[in-house]
Image (spheres, rainbow, N blue to C red):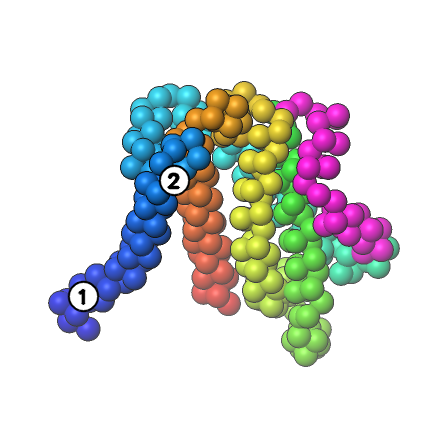
Amino acid sequence: MTPTAAREERAKRWARRLLPIAFWLLVWHCASVAIGHDILLVSPIDAGARLIELAGRADFWISIGLSLTRIALGFFSALAAGVVLAALASRIGFVRDLLAPLVAAVKAVPVASFVILVLIWVSSDHLSVIISFLMVFPIVYTNMLEGIEQTDAGLLEMARVFDMGRLDRLRFIYCSQAMPYFQAACSLSLGMCWKAGIAAEVIGLPALSIGEHLYEAKVYLDTPDLFAWTFVIICISILFERAFKKLVDAVVGALERAA
């Protein structure tokens, strides 16, 4: 492909991405003008101006950093626990039977119920960590358990015949076979993790958190603040998901090259 053709292809890709966004921003602006009340629906221009104003304050970035740290801690803890316990459950039937009712209960109980129950035991500063963990763990556990169980029996038999060590089996067979399930679990749980974590902050109101700012925007009917912080949540969620996907792809690429 020539440099000119490559530039044209990049321009087309950007156009395909930006035109739908521009369309919905226009729809949003027209709806705001038609309603005519900023309390009910603020225009994207006012929301953007408020976002720029907030970005100049130190507590804006501190709140983002603290919320991101809490939710990411819950996510990665659930990721580690889900993978380890799924590996144990695949080998030990008692562990699987023991975890089955717990996983089913966590999947069925609403987020609000968990928030109220957890607040009885822990402070609001740790609430979003635990809620994020509880939302992610069942997804990772069930997907990884399924992935391990679907590992090709022929490959495992070949590994036994050639006396392959446990670490090599884990690295070259289980990791490659279960990786699609792991990626699917991460894709499903990342968005849910952010929604549940921010919802927990709105209820628990830890100091200097995104949830606290959302609650204040609701109390004071500050619609520009509400939309500005909602936009921040969307952006952080997308960036976090893409960064994590790049990390997973890098790990998968390293494993494939080693193989």
Residue 205 shown left or right of residue 239 in the figure: right
Q: Quadrant of the N terminus?
A: bottom left
* Distance Cα–Cα, label 2 vs label 1: 40 Å
Is the residue marked by circle 2 packed among few (<14), some (14-19), or many (20+) residues within 10 Å? few
Q: Residue at x 48, y 66 (%)?
A: 256
- The label number, if any, that marks residue 90 in the structure image: none
**Depth check: 167 or 196 in front?**
196
Per the picture, the main secondary structure of the magenta-coloured stretch is: helix
Q: Is residue 127 above or below residue 149?
A: above
**Depth check: 87 or 33 in front?**
33
When asked about the image quadrant of residue 204, the answer is top right
- The label number, if any, that marks residue 35 in the structure image: 2
**First reached walking from the N terminus: tag 2 or tag 1:** 1
Question: Is residue 171 visible from the viewing direction of this image?
Answer: no
Q: Are marks 2 and 1 in contact (CB under 8 Å)?
A: no
The residue pinned by badge 1 equals 8
The residue under label 2 is which amino acid type?
Ile
Q: Which residues are magenta?
A: 95-124
Q: Residue at x 69, y 51 (%)?
A: 138
**Depth check: 96 or 192 in front?**
192
